[in-house]
Image (cartoon, rainbow, N blue to C red):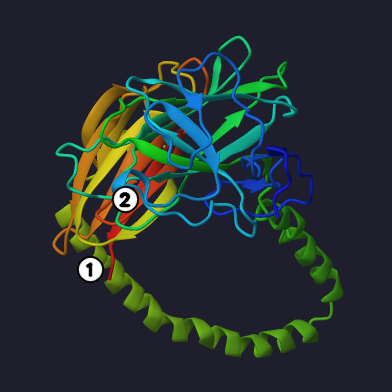
Amino acid sequence: MKKPGFISVLLAFAFLSRGQPIDCTFKPPQVTIHFGRGNVRDLNSGDLSYQRVSTSCPTDGHYSFAPSTSACFSDDWHTILEDHTPGDAAGNMLLVNAAPYKSIFLRTAIPGLKSSTTYELGLWLMNLCKPTKKCPFPLLPNLNIRLETPEGKIVANIVTGDLPRVQTPQWTQHRAYFTTPASTSTLMLVMIDTAPGGCGNDFALDDITFRECVKQTTSTTAPLKTTPATKPSTRARPSNKPKPEPKKVSTVARPKEVQPTGVIKPKADTTSKTISVAKQSQKIFPLPPLVLKTRENALARKIETEAGEIKIELYDNGEIDGDTISIYHNNTLIKSHMRLSQKPISVTIAVSPSQPHHEIIMVAENLGSIPPNTSIMIITTASSRYEVFISSSEQKNAKVVFDLKK
């Protein structure tokens, strides 16, 4: 059940989240914007090009808070019976019908965030328009969602890319990770529709959340420090001073010596397997260049997909600070020293039975003015859309793997 207010501040124990960055555990949302219930107050601040209306079918240049839609614009919109928030009753979502020109449709303050703290900004979006033939060239929403300091410095940036029309209503989540400035606890959330209005470009938005990221300490390092081999062995030697006891141990150890002889067969099998894999990889991959051999190639995402063309787009994931990257496809350089910005760096690959495995590796050529080198990768397949947070440095590359679904 939603409470009347727009913003809920929730503090609780940490829990693990899907899609989280490496070594990060999320707390429950510190701030949640769910647009309330009923005829609630407006949260927009400032002089905006959009005007609020009370209908559930807002026209061009208007927005509304409504719990549902039904037969809008001669049934050109999806009929949505409820908002995105699970378990509420008659909860609102934000419905936006695009203005004629690129403009801000939402601006609101986000108070109370901790300084010098990493957060995840998340929100849910839906293209309201059905894939009809009413428009010869249907317009698609393309949003730029930013967090700014009061002085206008960009802290986080989400570029959604085109939100496709789909046959049935479908919510998709968009996320960005950011670190709050040391001296600022209140940020401005600014949302811009970069595409023009007209036939199409209508969307719904709900459940904006801010979750604190708590860095994990890896569990593998602690056991290595607490289980050194030298301490047990030094204690064991004094206790085994009588010579007969080592002889007994040696006789007991004989069955253990049999085990390696039994392991020889699996070793032979594994070597034969690695040889066959190496032969196959030589057909697909050239030898990796030095920058892939001398840096760690950390796996950011592995995706299994059906055969077909895959579109990959890379945007800067924060302030445009001069980050440049090179992109390798199966160890071959395909993009060199490309500057990340709000305009995508686009790559297209084809997954097929003859080429079922693809590796895309992003290499940081510099760290820009705000290290590390970060970007957001938007992946579009024939049936799915993914967002992957990419972080690379002078010691670590970022790798995304695509495999043909079996």
Mark 1 or mark 2, which has the lower sequence index?
2
The residue pinned by badge 1 equals 276
Left or right for 16, reference 72? right
Q: Residue at x 19, y 40 (%)?
A: 135
Q: Are marks 1 and 2 in contact (CB under 8 Å)?
A: no
Percent from the top left, x then y, of residue 157? 48, 27
Q: Position of residue 353 (x, y in %)?
A: 16, 64
> Can see residue 296?
no
Percent of width and height locating residue 402:
30, 54
Give the vertical position of 83 relative to 375 (above or below): below
33 vs 361, left or right, is right
From the image, which quarter does the N terminus lie in?
Answer: bottom right
Which label belongs to residue 75?
A: 2
Q: Amino acid at mark 1?
A: Ser
Q: Give the residue displayed 37% in from the left and 24% down from the top.
A: 99
In the depicted structure, whether residue 152 falls above or below residue 231: above
Q: In terms of depth relative to the viewer, which is nearer, 150 or 303?
A: 150
> To which quarter of the image does residue 164 belong?
top left
Mark 1: few/some/many CA within 10 Å (<14, 14-19, 20+)? few
- Which residue is found at the position 54% from the left and 52% from the top? 84
Which image quadrant: the C terminus?
A: bottom left
Q: Which of labels 1 and 2 is toward the front? A: 2
Q: Secondary structure at mark 1?
A: helix
Q: Tell me where residue 305 sits by quadrant.
A: bottom left
